[in-house]
Amino acid sequence: MSLHIAPERTRSVVPGATVQRLPVYLHVLAGLRDRGVATVSSAELAAVSGVTSAKLRKDLSYLGSFGRRGVGYDVDYLHSVIAGWLGIQQEIAVVIVGVGNLGHALASYPGFAQRGFSVAGLVDIDPDLVGQRVQTGDGMVLVEPYDRLTALAQRCQIGIIATPDASAQGVCDQLVQAGIREILSFASRVLVVPDDVQVRHIDLGAELSVLASRPRRTTAVSA
Amino acid sequence: MSLHIAPERTRSVVPGATVQRLPVYLHVLAGLRDRGVATVSSAELAAVSGVTSAKLRKDLSYLGSFGRRGVGYDVDYLHSVIAGWLGIQQEIAVVIVGVGNLGHALASYPGFAQRGFSVAGLVDIDPDLVGQRVQTGDGMVLVEPYDRLTALAQRCQIGIIATPDASAQGVCDQLVQAGIREILSFASRVLVVPDDVQVRHIDLGAELSVLASRPRRTTAVSA
DNA sequence: TAGATTGTTAATCGATTAACAATC
DNA sequence: TAGATTGTTAATCGATTAACAATC
């Protein structure tokens, strides 16, 4: 007996909140594997990952069912499942625009290479930087001038914007023009993009603000 | 007639999602103010901020009511309200541990100073870095050796961890010991902290993973 | 007044959690 | 079998959205 599934409804079934946690699980599993742990329960894995066991099992359930009741999960196998789902099998090429301190930090960030992203291009307008080689997670990469952006972007799937705020929208436009559909931005301004382009935005100042606002409590007002 | 409000229930009434967006509004308002715009409607402000007008008004409603029906918001006034609420009046001191590329980038990040955070301490174990002066948003700051961490942390409200993964938990423990209750971490591992400590965690690799996983669609399975 | 826009309500949506039947 | 742990359901929680009465 076969199951008919309406093709239109077979969209992205895994919630964004879950996708965001999968790399954490992956990282923890890699650690366990390296320490020779063969099997792990949802309770253990969840504790180390900083989530509840119910949330962990729910997250995994979106990908399928990989555990054995009464036993737990095979560390190796679960690692390969998550890695596979996250697309780590295939290298994803990334271009970083802006090679100041932040760009440098991103280029050399070991987590990118670990997760199958490779820095395929570095671009800056500063003539002092252009021509330099920068150490990335998987090899040295040349900093190229700004007019090479389009050519580089056409070979990449993700663009990272690490320029000053003022240049961010211009860079973004050019990335989009070159066909990039996924952008990670560190500018503290909102980027305007077409509907089919996904932007993730990391505002470091906002992160601090959230932390700083926590202890604040609104005073009760009487009328 | 006066209103009695149960004191126990007067906790943090502003949702976290809202707090996270307030700095964006603040930034947009500052831009409008600098361009001489005196009044703005929720629809305009929302469009530039990249949210819907309903969400914007709802967000502002948590702080109070500051607009004029039929008119909109006074840009200057609304800016001062949000800035005030976010605690920008009082400088918040931050200590950054790890002054590699990422630490450098954070130290010089203009958005921190703009939002009233000041980098009051920089700490690293590398003897080559210790003693150097690093440009921050508001002046040069000396890189101090690791054994000064506790002393510096006692003068700060927020600790930022920009060290390699392996050192992150140790640094975190020491920050907590020194009395820090708010931590921003860039380590790709989960930090274990007491219940009263708030950790925000930026995993750059996870951000890329979310982007990269978007176009992927789960294949329909038949049984 | 007529038109515009806020502040707030109620409905909707999505994510988290607790609980437990299924099953190793 | 008895104990353990998964995968899933249903309830809960929190955030978003649409709509509109209040009011400038």
Image: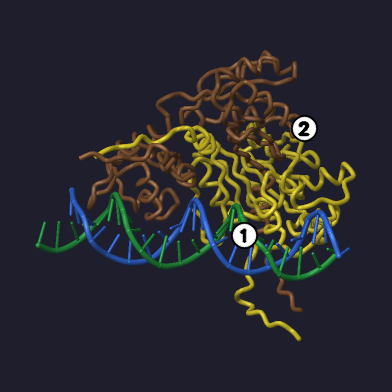
Chain colours: A brown, B yellow, C blue, D green
Which three-letter amino acid code belongs to the residue tagged 1? Pro
Q: Return the chain for callout 1.
A: B
The numbered mark at residue B15 is 1
| Dot 2 crowding, Cα within 10 Å, few <14, some 14–19, many 20+ | few
Res B60 → quadrant: bottom right
The residue located at (77%, 32%) in the rendering is: A166
| The C terminus of chain B: image quadrant | top left
Element under disc 2: helix
- Say if B96 sits above or below D24 in the image: above
Q: Is residue D12 left or right of residue A128?
A: left
Asked if labels 1 and 2 share a chain, the reply is no
Query: Is disc 1 placed on a helix, strand or loop?
Result: loop
Quick one: label 1, few (<14), some, or many (20+) residues within 10 Å?
few
The type of residue carrying mark 2 is: Ala
Query: Residue A199: image x %, image y %?
Result: 60, 36
Say which mark, if any, is on residue A166. Answer: 2
Residue A222 coordinates in the image, percent (x, y): 74, 78
Q: Are marks 1 and 2 in contact (CB under 8 Å)?
A: no
Q: Is residue A202 left or right of residue A3?
A: right
